[in-house]
Amino acid sequence: MTRWLPALALLAACAQPAAPCVQVGLAEQAFGDALQSLSLVCPECKTPQLLPSEAVDPACVFFIGPRIRVVYNRPELERIASRYGYPAIVGIFGHELGHLIDHHGGKRTDELSADMWAGCTLGIAGLPVSPLGAYLDDEGTKVDGTHPAPPKRKDAIADGAEACSQIWDD
Ligand SMILES: [Zn+2]
């Protein structure tokens, strides 16, 4: 796991009080930095293309042959941030980053594992998981048929947060 920590930490840093990631633009930028960091630890990995588009809700990673594209819906993320609080969007970007980490790690990506990485990002940031949990409770079932039910996802997020909140303790 340590191999991926710099990328997760970059995304988490955007959520610190000194640099509050209250705007989607900042989360986007932090996510871009995190992707750069992934390419440093994994030179053989393709750098994903970031593409804002209102065709997804709220974000999705596409693996198309050798190409990787992360698509995210900016207005929708703005809405989620203002309704549930910015930790929710840090968690959503953490989830997409998790898909990429699993893919780069040669693991078949699955939603609960990506949720664990989302929790890990929040745990590193010292942010609560409840905003992401509230979003999933309210809207987690509308997304599509590809994601498990919200209670399972919230368990995975809590597990990831728990595992990663210990990382900086001496
Ligand atoms: Zn996913």
Image (spheres, grey):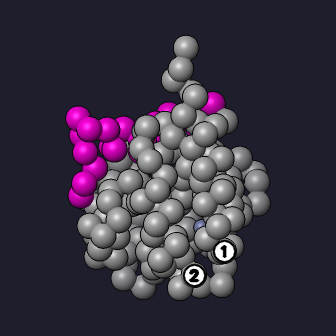
- The residue depicted at 65 percent of the width and 47 percent of the height is 159
Nearer-the-camera pick, 150 or 28: 150
- The residue depicted at 66 percent of the width and 74 percent of the height is 149
- The residue depicted at 71 percent of the width and 47 percent of the height is 105
Dot 2 or dot 1: first in sequence order is 2
| Figure quadrant, ligand 1 | bottom right
Q: Establish if 49 lies above or below 126.
A: below
Q: Establish if 30 lies above or below 126.
A: below
Q: Position of residue 28 (x, y in %)?
A: 33, 57
The residue pinned by badge 1 equals 149
Disc 2 to disc 1: CB gap under 8 Å: yes
| Magenta region | 2-23
Nearer-the-camera pick, 61 or 132: 132
Q: How many marks?
A: 2
The stretch drawn in magenta includes residue 6: yes
The stretch drawn in magenta includes residue 167: no
Crowding at dot 2, Cα within 10 Å, few <14 / some 14-19 / many 20+, comes out as: some
Left or right? Give the position of 12 relative to 140. Answer: left
Q: Secondary structure at mark 1?
A: loop
Tag 2: amino acid: Thr
In the rendered image, which quarter is residue 53 located in? Answer: bottom left
Q: Residue furthest top?
A: 170
Nearer-the-camera pick, 158 or 145: 158
Q: Position of residue 80 (x, y in %)?
A: 34, 70
Tag 1: amino acid: Ala
The residue pinned by badge 2 equals 141
Q: Quadrant for the C terminus, please.
A: top right
Q: CA distance from mark 2 to mark 1?
A: 7 Å
